Image (cartoon, rainbow, N blue to C red):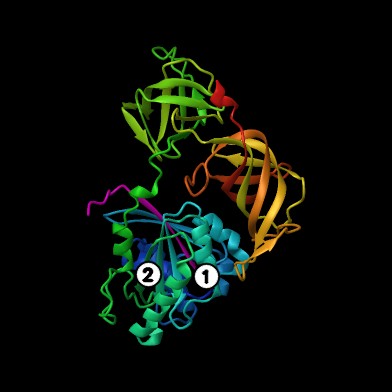
Amino acid sequence: MNIDNNQLLRFTTAGSVDDGKSTLIGRLLYDSKSIFQDQINAVENSSKQKGLESIDLAMFTDGLRDEREQGITIDVAYRYFTTPKRKFIIADTPGHIQYTRNMVTGASTANVALILIDARHGVIEQTRRHAFIASLLNIPHIIVCVNKMDLVDYDEQVYNKILRDFEEFASKMLTRDITFIPMSALDGDNVVHRSEHMSWFQGAPLLYTLETLHISSDLNKLDFRFPVQTVIRPQLKGFEDYRGYAGRLSSGVVRKGDEITALPSGFTSKVASIHLGDQEVDEAFAPMSVAITLVDDIDVARGDMLVRSNNVPELSQEFDIMMCWLHDQPSLPRKKYKIMHANNEQVCIIKDKVYKIDIQSLKRMDTPEEFQMNEIGRVTLKISKALMIDRYRENRMTGSVILVDEQTHETIAAGMIVEVRVLVTEFLNR
């Protein structure tokens, strides 16, 4: 299999408290030699001060003082490492129910979710909850890490029962690419190197699985979406008439000569040139950041979106989202919030509360009065000005929104677009 050495894979960890998430990442970094020697020395000294006989691998990721003192993960800890085959960004997310919002933010851009299961306890409520959130966030790949196999004598029957239980629950989810790996993060079995204690397992260890996982098809290559971030007018000699529209492709591919439509105006033109830095290229694809010039001088500004003329998003002022409430103050009826979508900012209100999800049972609770921190549910938003949107299942970049308090400028909620309520079609008639 050919792997692009520059390809970036983002993965997140999820699991119940003390399932060994931080220890697993610490082992992954330690055994793959992705940690500087001074960091290793510091953790070794800290481990000795705590009276431990061996190095505490979890300390490589538990960066907050409260995390180290309590031995738990509270905030999302991001770590970066590289192997000869791939670059990685890790989001180590908390296992506690009260930090559900942190898992949502850490997993929102992930290609892969590592769901840890303690081999002694099997599939528990928190396992189902994290698998449900991973499915809700449309994470393309799930790797189920059956950890602490050393504490069940590396029993194959224990592993097989967990596999069957998880598959039974996962059959109700939309995620289809699920891989299972039995391991011991503490001892290193099947993390970077194959385990000598589990010869019955014929699969690859975790690092090899991450290095060779096919993620190129995770990106939406069909729907060209180019939110304009800024307009470039150099006013320099040789560039007197240059007018470039700069931004990052959210999805799809664009080539010179393609016919495009600028939204929300609906005016059409063709791509005259594409610049990647100071080089002109014939095509660009997500998630490249480029500047695009058009054949015609049409009015395009920040917040507009360039799309292919025969493949346009929906223009809507009212749509439903699955929302995770992130703030300690509850939601208020008819309160105005700033909504941020791609490079666009508008004002919105929560028009209707459709239902709330009981994070314990994953059942729907009808017509909630308000949303508290960490709660997830479906609501209808009404926007002051129409946005160019896709459903989250079809496009994670143009299908997600953030709500911000207008007074404090704090992020209060994150949402995934699930259904369009009111479709605006004026631009189609131009």
Q: Is residue 418 visible?
A: yes
Percent x, y for residue 372? 70, 60
Q: Please determine whether, in this image, residue 102 is positioned above or below residue 267.
A: below
Distance (Cα) linking label 2 and label 1: 25 Å
Of circles 2 and 1, the one toward us is 1
Quadrant in which residue 10 is drawn: bottom left
Which numbered disc flags the more N-terminal residue, 2 or 1? 2
Magenta stretch holds residue 14: yes
Percent x, y for residue 308? 43, 30
Residue at 44%, 25% (x, y): give it. 260
Q: Please determine whether, in this image, residue 370 is positioned above or below residue 418.
A: below
Label 2 neighbourhood size at 10 Å, few (<14), some (14-19), many (20+)? many
Magenta stretch holds residue 299: no
Which residues fall within the magenta stretch? 1-16
Label 1 neighbourhood size at 10 Å, few (<14), some (14-19), many (20+)? many
Q: Inspect the image, locate mark 1, and give the three-letter code of the amino acid beneath it.
A: Arg
Residue at 41%, 66% (x, y): give it. 25
Pick out the residue farthest to the left. 1
Answer with left or right where residue 410 lies relative to residue 292: right
- Quarter of the picture holding the C terminus: top right
Q: Inspect the image, locate mark 2, and give the three-letter code of the amino acid beneath it.
A: Arg
Percent x, y for residue 341? 57, 40
Pick out the residue farthest to the bottom. 153
**What SS does tag 2 mark?**
helix
Quadrant in which residue 41 is drawn: bottom left
Q: Find residue 128 and name its label.
A: 1
Q: Which residue is mark 2?
A: 27
